[in-house]
Amino acid sequence: MSLRVDITPLRSSRDFRLLVSASTVFYLGASIAYVAVPYQIYTLTGSNTMVGLIGLVELIPLLISGLWGGALADHVDRRRLLVATGLAQVFLTSVLAVNAALAAPQIWLLFVIAPFLVSASALQRPSREALLPRTVTHDQLPAANALSSMGWQFGNLVGPTIGGLLLSSVGASWCFIVDVFGIAIATSLYARMRRYPHREQTTPPSFAGILEGVRYAVSRRDLLGTYAVDIAVMFLAMPIVLFPALAATIFREPHLLGLLYTSETVGALIASGLSGWHRRVHSYGKVVVIAASGYGLFIALAGQAPSLWLCCVALAAAGACDMTSAVFRMTLWNQSIPEGLRGRLAGIEMLSYSVGPLAAQVRAGYTADSWGVRRAITVGGVASVLGVILTAGVLREFWGYDARTDEHLLAERARRAEHGEAVAGQGEP
């Protein structure tokens, strides 16, 4: 069995190449700017509380815009929405760059721009995710998801490093300037894609339309399983907020903190590069459950590792498990959700993997102060394994999901064949 990543979607679809290239550049720039915002807030105020507040002011806009962006993606031209929201992000990030270049940057401006910037990003993401299945054939979706994930992980690995170097050498303003160029390049690549008009009657964006998407998600227990597993893993096991304390007080090597932050990403990239076996697997539910349980197990081991290096190995293994789980969840979504609901469901999915990490920061911080850093990480990992197993036991349809027999997947494959979408990247010039 070949383990090498399947690059067939890159060879066969011009629009998939454009979409993945744009997303990779976008993630890279966003990761560079991501390290600049908290750094700038802390240097201006000297307050960790103020750094935490930036996430709080972003939460409500993220929730509202994620759901509304999904509703828009099911009604408007998705490519145009990608371009429009990209231009908005260019303008907003440019404001941050100008502010950072001032002799006395204004802290209030960061808190004003942040909600609008996260709103533009949340409006964009459902369209990007809903458009991906249209750019490749139905059977290429497992490989397409793995390749798309590699782009995200590359940006997540390299971006913070570049951001740190820019902060230490030329300042925060250049982090935002690089991000502006990245967003502009990504937006130009989105603009070069073909049009993918909706093939069926669309639902205008409304609260009722959003509720229709929620009702559909709730009606499918296999989808509920993917959301529940993701939330359980992110909320109960995610240890990132404890990395500074782990490096400084447990291993007493604060200068190696960066290794803790990058270890999961390295493991995820390795898993993506060895994803050739994905195309031979049909029991998606079982793979997600096993991989998600593996993530919790390796996080628990990381909490008890006797050295920072062994901790990094455990985190890398956890990252590989997490990436495997994510790819199969995305494949289940992209292969089986009807085209007319894909945007709204992408908005719901975005919330499932965005809100969990935010809540995990509160959970991890409280348990670490109460039980100690090591015990908080280990107990969180074990609890996530139990949560995943409980989900699989309660939602049997999720555990037993089989791509060869699932009625929703077969119906979507038939619909695509009926509309002549057997050719990768088939759209309108």
Image (spheres, rainbow, N blue to C red):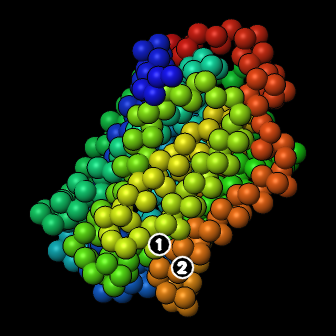
Is there a contact, CB below 8 Å, between mark 2 and mark 1? yes
Measuring from the top left, give residue 192's x and y in whole percent. 42, 23
Provide the residue designation for mark 1: 303
Q: Give the numbered dot on residue 39.
A: none
Q: Amino acid at mark 2?
A: Ala
Q: Amino acid at mark 1?
A: Gly
| Residue farthest to the left, as pictured | 169
Q: Nearer the viewer, residue 310 or 396?
A: 310
Which residue shows up at 62% across the image and 61% down it?
233
Query: In front of the other: label 2 or label 1?
Result: 1
Q: Nearer the viewer, residue 57 or 407?
A: 407
- Determine whether, in the image, residue 180 is placed left or right of residue 376: left
- Eyeballing the image, is 86 above or below 402? below
Q: Give the numbered dot on residue 376.
A: 2
- Secondary element at tag 1: helix
Q: Nearer the viewer, residue 275 or 174?
A: 275
Place residue 252 in its image quadrant.
Answer: bottom left
Task: Please report whichever mark, 2 or 1, sits nearer to the chain's N-terminal start.
Answer: 1
Residues packed near mark 2 inside 10 Å, few (<14), some (14 to 19) or many (20 plus):
many
Which residue shows up at 35% across the image and 82% down it?
250
Which residue shows up at 47% across the image and 72% down it?
303
Residue 95 seen anywhere in this rendered image of the structure? no
